[in-house]
Amino acid sequence: MTRSRLKARHIPILATVVVFGLLYAAASFCFPHFFTLRVFVNLFIDNAFLGIVAVGMTFAILSGGIDLSVGSVVACTGIVMSKLITQHGWHPVLVILFVLVAGTAFGAAMGFFIAFYDLPPFIVTLAGMFLARGTSQIISLESIPLRSPLLTSIANFGITLSNRVDFPFIAILLVGVVAVGTWIAQYTPFGRNIYAIGGNEQSASMMGLPVRRTKIGIYAFSGFFATLGGVVYTLYTFSGYSLSGIGLELDAIASVVIGGTLLSGGVGYLPGTLLGVLIQGVIQTFISFEGTLNSWWTKIIIGALLFVFILLQTWIARSAHFRRQGKRENSIGR
């Protein structure tokens, strides 16, 4: 029985691996130049900010919550960075530290209201979304270019993979963030508490786990990763704009779900989230190679994949329910 349970927990991420492999193979079959090292590296570059934001979103969904503020936090981070560095002459390192601390505190504040007032995460983070978006628009409605020789050097840094291909800083950062996030989720008491709360919050509380403290930590982490994603997005575009990142929270949620994390919480893996992000990247790149399809086909295909994965999650949840019910009936019969 234990073995079958383990298999059920791994079905979503195995499905994610299969979907990614099939999509990549199909794209490579249709376009010979798709199966190249440059295209593969570009998947990491173009989606680095989304992947980092999705790491924080994974923590929130694993706990049975959600964070709708991440797209607005990305926009607010970019506009604050560009304003302070380009127009006020602040040192880039000081600005990055400032926005990371502010973003983490913002997430922790939302976690405080969720944990201590039992408010739904959807409502609290929706308020956070409007607050961050409004703040960024008050700062500036215009796009502000980012001018910093130091940040230019950092953005141009990369590890050479071949004569023509480098693995740049933002892609390295994405891989590092996923690795650290995986370690936190799988090998620390904080990570185990997240899984326990997502599995059954009432049981976690009865076991004496620090539910409120963990919830604050979850949304502080989400705020930190959303802000870090905003830093990466600013390095990617070298500008700050108050309307950037609209809908990014939905892309992050889609990446987490397609990556195999159950929306009900308690089950999921961060490497799966990375694969979910790369699946979106493969679809976008395929449409770009094809040349005649509208970019909105990306949303249509992602929507279809989401539907399939939610059906898969529903089947797993119902199977687990019937399995528990069967065990209960067997114990009563004895």
Image (cartoon, grey):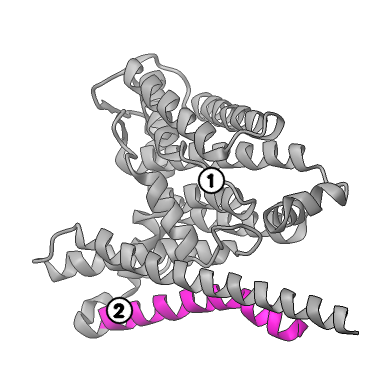
Image coords of residue 9 (percent x, y): 63, 74
Badge 1: residue crowd in 10 Å (few <14, some 14–19, many ≥20): many
Which residue is outermost to the left? 292
Image coords of residue 66 (percent x, y): 53, 45
Pick the residue in front: 306 or 76.
306
Q: Amino acid at mark 2?
A: Phe
Which residue is outermost to the front? 333
Tag 1–tag 2 contact (CB < 8 Å):
no
For residue 83, side relative to residue 4 (left or right): left
Q: Secondary structure at mark 1?
A: loop
In the image, residue 20 lies in the stretch drawn in magenta? yes
Name the magenta segment's main secondary structure: helix
**Distance from Cα at disc 1 to Cα at disc 2:** 35 Å
For residue 214, side relative to residue 159 (left or right): right
Q: Secondary structure at mark 2?
A: loop
Q: Quadrant of residue 35?
A: bottom left
Image coords of residue 40 (percent x, y): 36, 69
Res. 190 visible in picture: no
Badge 2: residue crowd in 10 Å (few <14, some 14–19, many ≥20): some
The C terminus is located in which quarter?
bottom right
Q: Residue at x 59, y 70 (%)?
A: 317
User: For the magenta stretch, what is the residue range?
Assistant: 1-28
Q: What residue would you read off at disc 1?
A: 66
Q: Residue at x 74, y 80 (%)?
A: 326
For residue 243, side relative to residue 217 (left or right): left
Pick the residue in front: 33 or 319.
319
Q: What residue would you read off at disc 2?
A: 35
Image coords of residue 133 (percent x, y): 38, 27
Q: Amino acid at mark 1?
A: Ile
Q: Residue at x 45, y 18 (%)?
A: 90
For residue 48, side relative to residue 197 (left or right): left
